[in-house]
Amino acid sequence: MLRLISRAAAAAAALSKQRNDTVLTSTSILIHQFFYSTKTQTKSSKKKQDDNKKSSKSKSKSSDANSLSAPAAAQADSADDLESVRARARRLAEDDRNPSLDVGPNHRPLFTKTTSLSLLTRKDACTYFKFSEDELNAMLPEGLPTGMLGEFKDSMRYALLVRQSFLDIRDNFRRIVDPSLQSTNGPKIRKQIVLDGPLCCGKSITLAMLVHWAREEGWLVLYVPRGREWTHGGYFYKNPQTGLWDTPLQAENVLKDFIKYNESHLRELPCQILDPIPLGEGAGVGLLKGVDSKEISEGSTLFDLVQMGINQMHASVGVVVRLRKELSLVKDIPVLIAIDQYNNWFTFSEYEEPVTIRSTRPVHARELAMVSINSFFALQID
């Protein structure tokens, strides 16, 4: 570092010397010319100085004008863009009021007249189903997938394409609940499905529509629209009781999202496993002194279990693991567990374990307590 500083100083000194030599040389030339032509150069030099002053003033004025016009131009562009968006919205609203314009490919209606996802049939495939903003926020309080938001923004409508994949998956789970719909010649029923496909092909939208349908039918749904957050960000600790890594912040967020829509169901479902919940470290507060588990009282409901994990961060990871086991035992109502970005659970997480003073080891997602037990999921999205 000292050599670099000395070299930089020497280079700067050489550059400044070179600049001084240049200035002195040009000054000497000007003096020499002035010495031999004092009378002839005086008027012309004054004229040149006046011209230079005028030009500098005119340049400063033009630069000021440009600097003032730049924000005005940007504001005008944004105003034009906003006006064009409003004009397009008005045209779309007018088109919606004109039934003759509701024409799609092969002269079929562009929008389906069906008002429920449960009533959609194969004839409605490749048409658009209209939602309301309030309905979506109420049915999917965990958040909407990015692809769905992008489609709403581009089309300026709360409408989604009815994909054949959605109808197939919906009918698959419908046959599981209602055996009378099953047939010997029909497709094989699958209790666990993994959706795979290229980026932006509609997997997340299909999943969100399925969650919407299941909740319309009264199902208990654990919906995770951002599975990547289970393996990235927040605090992480190794639990000495389990040998796995705890992520208490993620666990708390999962429980808060789960209770948003399912509170009424959770209050009616009793806990079937009464074993104590193992405690881990809280985010930034460490372990509790002298306490390593939390008792579950007899008669507790799943709502009480979830509230325990929300109110006491040391128990949040243990509650999520226990909740997944409890959901596998529920028989009173259908249960759907839907995970988006599921592929993040089969690679390395963002966390690293110190091995030596100067080296770390990447922690795989299967080493995380919340991810390690994944045999209870009914639907996953890559």
Image (spheres, grey):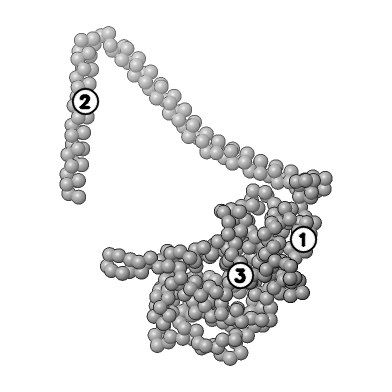
Q: Tell me the element at label 3.
A: loop
What amino acid type is highlighted by mark number 1?
Answer: Thr
**CA distance separating discs 1 and 3:** 23 Å
Q: Which residue is tagged 1?
A: 121
Query: What residue lies at 18% left-to-right and 31% top-to-bottom?
Result: 17
In the image, is residue 237 above or below residue 111?
Answer: below
x and y percentages locating residue 326 in the rendered image: 58, 81
Between 108 and 112, the one nearer to me in the picture: 108
Asked if one can make out residue 233 in the rendered structure from this viewpoint, the answer is no
Q: Which residue is mark 2?
A: 22
Image location of residue 107, percent across then percent down: 79, 46
Q: Nearer the viewer, mark 1 or mark 3?
A: 3
Residue 300, image quadrant: bottom right
Q: In the image, what residue occupies the spot 60% across and 85% down?
A: 271
Residue flagged by tag 2: what amino acid is it? Thr
Q: Which residue shows up at 49% across the image and 71% down it?
A: 371
First in residue order: circle 1 vs circle 3: 1
